[in-house]
Amino acid sequence: DVLVEMDADFSHRPIDLKGILKDLENADFVVGSRYVAGGGTKNWGLLRKIISRGGGLYARCILGFPLNDWTGGFNAWKKEVLEKIHLDGVKSNGYSFQIELKYKALKAGCRGVESPIYFEDRRVGQSKMSLRIVLEALYRVWILKVR
């Protein structure tokens, strides 16, 4: 059994799901990554690029696992992983939710891999990015690390 999460605003391309599911055959979870060979972004401003790349580097350095795309929301999870990390105990919201799920899975010994995706800025709706969400991600990483 598999759970796939992706944005519903056309930012994540359904065509990338094929590669993610293929990669899941040899992993416990797959991160759809904008930052591995073959991945990328389109129509992003400089500030968004800095926040996304900087946030990933920040999480990688503090948490100690070599993921490139900690905040991305196009992921596939085997059911056993979600049971192992106790989803009901996840405390984060926003981008830190993505970080917390990935960290808990890696810390529990689950094997995660990154699969290239192409992320186009939303065609419909408004971004939910806010200063509060960014600040939450910054401090939640430290809370995760010390637990």
Image (spheres, helix red, strand yellow):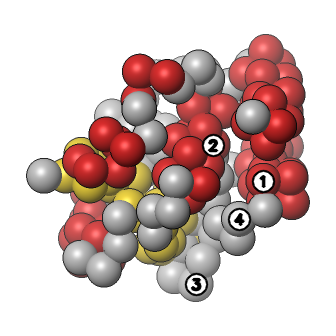
Assess disc 4: are there few (<14), some (14-19) or many (≥20) residues with their C-alpha within 10 Å of its C-alpha: some
The x and y percentages for residue 72 are 55, 49
Q: Amino acid at mark 4?
A: Phe
Inter-mark Cα distance, 4 to 2: 11 Å
Q: Looking at this rendering, what residue extends furthest in the bottom direction?
A: 37
- Return the residue at label 1: 63
Indicate the secondary structure of the residue bearing disc 3: loop
Q: Residue at x 71, y 65 (%)?
A: 65
Relative to 32, is 46 on the left or the right? right
Of mark 2 and mark 1, the one earlier in the sequence is 1
Quarter location, residue 35: bottom right
- Can you tell which of label 4 and label 3 is closer to the viewer? 4
Assess disc 3: are there few (<14), some (14-19) or many (≥20) residues with their C-alpha within 10 Å of its C-alpha: few
Inter-mark Cα distance, 1 to 4: 6 Å
- Return the residue at label 3: 37
Tell whether label 1 touches label 2 (CB within 8 Å). yes
Indicate the secondary structure of the residue bearing disc 4: loop
Of mark 3 and mark 1, the one earlier in the sequence is 3
Q: Amino acid at mark 1?
A: Leu
Inter-mark Cα distance, 2 to 1: 10 Å
Residue 65 numbered mark, or none: 4
Whether residue 99 is visible, yes or no, is yes
| Residue 61, above or below 111 | above
Inter-mark Cα distance, 3 to 1: 23 Å
Q: Residue at x 44, y 40 (%)?
A: 85
